Amino acid sequence: MIQLTIDGTKIVAQPGKNLLQVCLENDVYVPHLCYMEGMEDPPASCRLCLVEIEGVNGPVASCRIAPRDGMVVTTQSQAVRQLQRSALQLLLSAHRVDCRNCASNKRCALQQMAKFLKVPLKVKHLDHLLDETDYQLNHPVLEYDPGKCVLCGKCIYVCTRQQAHPVLTFARRGFETVIGFMGSTPPSELPCLDCLACSAICPVSAIYPKKPEAASSHSPGPADQRLNGVGKQ
Ligand code: SF4
Ligand code: SF4
Ligand code: FES
């Protein structure tokens, strides 16, 4: 077992868990978005799970830290909170907030973190990021809302874990990054309808099943062709 100190409290942890897990399992809430239990190589892309570790320069992403014996961890310093607020504000600036009409309302990670960090949900938007009309996922049974997506990558991760031939990937680059469909599989052979793991895991309801009538009328569009092969070796 490993003994460490978190916010002044001595904690005993099992080896093999990362520091974020150890904090959460010991009722120390650390905001987080992109990490999922079981990830061997967390992407650490949301930059929310920051903590300070004695002897380490500057805050670090706890989802990528293996606890060590004698480690002294602070989760609530001013520097940590300021960086977490900035990271959350950046996410929210590219997210269309419409809680009343959102399937994630009241079980939403953004709402929980905004309340915890005292950040308003409606922040100034980066308007050019919210032009959602020029992108369609063009998936036979899934709908995707780029104006809601916070690019946590969880949908891609579960798709990769569940399917021998995953169909979701990141597409485009930089500010235009979206979730893409690797649409080379014939619709009748797609595993999606019996899976929907991406929709279940999405923290903001940005990817979700199409209504049955919309799903049955799908025909491949330009984006299917454009994204064919994206992410393949
Ligand atoms: S995902 Fe969360 S913050 Fe965004 S609209 Fe839905 S409930 Fe509101
Ligand atoms: S669709 Fe949802 S799960 Fe996928 S990257 Fe966007 S926010 Fe994350
Ligand atoms: S949960 Fe650690 S960086 Fe996102």
Image (tube, rainbow, N blue to C red):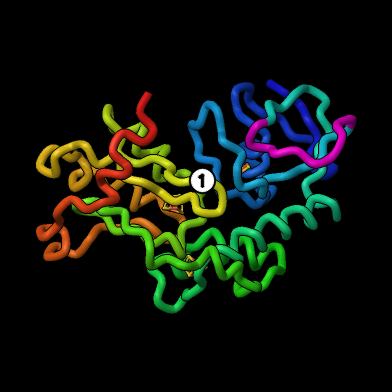
Residue 1 shown left or right of residue 82 in the figure? left
The answer to which quarter of the image holds residue 3 is top right
Q: Quadrant of residue 231?
A: top left
Q: Is residue 4 left or right of residue 20?
A: right
The residue furthest right is 55
Residue plotted at (81% across, 35% down): 5
Question: Which residue is at the front of the view, 123 or 184?
Answer: 184
Q: Which residues are magenta?
A: 55-64
The structure residue drawn at horizontal position 21% and vertical position 37%, both measured from the top left corner, is 184
The quadrant of the image that shows the N terminus is top right
In the image, what residue occupies the spot 67% across and 63% down? 89
Q: In the depicted view, which residue is nearer to us: 71 or 170?
A: 170
**Percent from the top left, x then y, of residue 172?**
45, 46
Q: Is residue 60 magenta?
A: yes
Q: Is residue 122 above or below residue 156?
A: below
Look at the image and tell me in which quarter the C terminus lies.
top left
Q: Is residue 184 left or right of residue 105?
A: left
- Residue to which mark 1 is pinned: 173
Could you tell whether 8 is left or right of 143 in the image? Answer: right
Task: Name the foreground residue: 44 vs 223.
Answer: 223
Q: Quadrant of residue 192?
A: top left
Q: Is residue 62 above or below residue 79?
A: above
Q: How far from the left and from the top, in percent, is residue 210?
A: 22, 61
> Which amino acid type corresponds to the residue marked 1 in the rendered image?
Arg
